[in-house]
């Protein structure tokens, strides 16, 4: 392995860690660098694997205890997240898609984890012990890779827990503050089809695209009609082909002007999509539709929602997030944040496609060429781990030890 490649990777994540830790205490800055580098090298959330990746000249147990103690005591999440958002701020553009979805981390055999609760396991479609996470991400402008902007792990067993919607509202308020005056569009799945959510977004004056549930009622021509019945009145006049999760679909699309009973006199549109599944897909939006291009733009925007699913898959397959074993909820939250921050950093690097990025992708030694792959996030993460596999010195040389100035004693002048 070329030592230059190892140096470039270390330098990149040292600079990224410095941005994350800006304004924090010196011990926290070193802890963040240890965690970021260790997770990139080991592709693991286990503190023992992270400690091995650091290559420190001390007993492994001492390093694990230090990381565990620093993670449990860390409390400046606000400053840490603001530092991360500052790295994203220059890349925000007008009319970006903001994708909202919940995920889960299941611990079916866990007994001693703090605030362990019952959650819905999306991968197995059942109820398991674990934690929920509220996630909001944007898609990078050119490559459409997921860039997390809000990732919060929470539990219904916490003392001050209100509801899942309240956790989502916190993220939506952050999004509004982050974009300031720039327009954006919220894209959500069926789980967010609720009167409270629609009312909240209307008060925020936010543009949205939400997939509807079949039990939803809408007002059409002053009549209250169930969504599936209303959708069957349109057979799809606009032909449209799209690739969803690697499969090609021939779709037919129509739209209907409707209203929500909870938002009277607010003009909305229901977009009906045939060809994806046995039942037509129904999307509700407050965007105006004037022509065929507006309808297709809404459908394509919702298709981009699958990018946040890739974000969850990267968390669990590449960084093995569900294998985390730290017992403190504070440490779990911190590791979850680090994984999200790393994915965002990777996505921003892939957006630039520099020589450094191309070299990392090459080191992954993949079967197919880069031209055939749309989502290169998996390959990039494996390339980083492959380069750092040959590292044997760790990051101790990057940690600056500042010498304190000599103390000046007071002297009496005679």
Image (cartoon, rainbow, N blue to C red):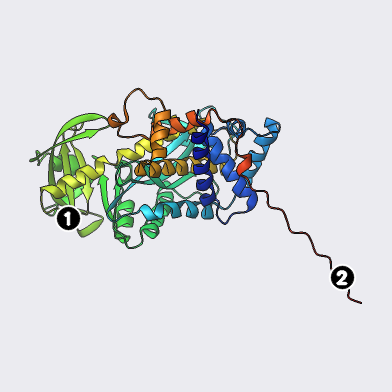
- Image x and y of residue 214, in percent: 23, 39
Q: Nearer the viewer, residue 295 or 10?
A: 10
Q: Give the spatial CA distance, label 1 vs label 2.
A: 79 Å
Could you tell me if the residues under marks 1 and 2 are in contact, i.e. CB atoms within 8 Å?
A: no
Determine whether 29 is above or below 183 in the image: above
Residue lying farthest right? 414
Q: Is residue 176 visible?
A: yes
Q: Which residue is mark 1?
A: 288
Total number of numbered discs in the rendering: 2
Element marked by disc 1: loop
User: Residue at the top extreme?
Assistant: 367
Horizontal arrangement in the rendering, residue 159 relative to residue 380 (left or right): right
- Of all residues, the one furthest to the left in this rendering is 237
Mark found first going from the N terminus, 1 or 2: 1
Element type at marker 2? loop
Any part of residue 115 in sight: no
Up the image or down, 219 lies above or below 12; here it is below
* Residue 174 image-quadrant placement: bottom left
In this rendered view, identify the residue nearer to me: 316 or 113. 316
| Residue in the foreground of this view, choosing between 234 and 215 | 234
Tell me the residue at 50%/35% (across/down). 4
Q: In the rendering, at what x and y percent does residue 61 appear?
A: 69, 32
Of circles 1 and 2, the one toward us is 2
Disc 2 packing (10 Å; few <14; some 14–19; many ≥20): few
From the viewer's perspective, tell me whether residue 86 is left or right of residue 278: right
Q: Residue 131's spot in the image, x, y percent?
A: 49, 38
Q: Residue at x 60, y 35 (%)?
A: 394
* Residue located at (80% from left, 64% from top): 408
Q: Which residue is mark 2?
A: 411
């Amino acid at each position: 392995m070329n030592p230059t490649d190892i140096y470039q990777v270390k330098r990149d994540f040292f600079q990224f860690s410095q941005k994350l830790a800006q304004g924090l205490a010196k011990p926290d800055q070193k802890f963040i660098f240890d965690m970021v580098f260790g997770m990139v090298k080991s592709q693991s959330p286990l503190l023992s694997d992270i400690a091995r990746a650091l290559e420190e000249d001390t007993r492994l147990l001492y390093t694990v205890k230090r990381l565990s103690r620093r993670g449990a005591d860390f409390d400046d999440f606000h400053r840490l997240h603001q530092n991360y958002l500052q790295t994203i701020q220059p890349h925000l553009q007008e009319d970006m898609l903001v994708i909202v979805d919940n995920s889960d981390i299941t611990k079916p055999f866990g007994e001693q984890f703090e605030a362990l609760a019952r959650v819905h396991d999306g991968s197995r479609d059942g109820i398991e012990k674990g934690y929920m996470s509220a996630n909001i991400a944007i898609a990078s402008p050119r490559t459409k890779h997921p860039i997390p902007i809000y990732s919060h792990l929470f539990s219904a067993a916490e003392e001050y827990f209100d509801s899942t919607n309240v956790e989502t509202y916190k993220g939506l308020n952050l999004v509004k503050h982050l974009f300031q005056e720039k327009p954006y569009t919220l894209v959500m799945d069926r789980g967010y089809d609720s009167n409270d959510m629609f009312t909240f977004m209307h008060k925020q004056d936010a543009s949205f695209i939400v997939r509807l549930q079949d039990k939803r009622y809408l007002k059409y021509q002053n009549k209250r009609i169930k969504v599936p019945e209303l959708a069957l009145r349109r057979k799809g006049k606009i032909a449209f082909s799209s690739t969803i999760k690697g499969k090609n679909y021939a779709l037919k699309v129509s739209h209907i002007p409707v209203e929500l009973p909870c938002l009277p006199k607010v003009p909305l549109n229901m977009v009906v999509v045939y060809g994806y599944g046995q039942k037509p897909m129904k999307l509700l939006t407050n965007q105006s539709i004037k022509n065929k291009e507006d309808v297709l733009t809404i459908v394509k925007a919702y298709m981009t929602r699958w990018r946040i699913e890739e974000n969850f898959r990267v968390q669990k397959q590449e960084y093995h997030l569900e294998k985390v074993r730290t017992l403190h909820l504070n440490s779990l939250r911190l590791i979850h944040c680090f994984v999200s921050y790393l994915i965002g950093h990777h996505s921003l690097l892939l957006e630039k496609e520099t020589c450094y990025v191309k070299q990392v992708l090459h080191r992954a030694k993949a079967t197919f060429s880069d031209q055939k792959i749309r989502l290169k996030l998996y390959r990039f993460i494996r390339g980083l781990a492959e380069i750092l596999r040959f590292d044997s010195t760790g990051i101790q040389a990057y940690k600056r030890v500042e010498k304190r100035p000599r103390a000046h004693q007071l002297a009496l002048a005679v």
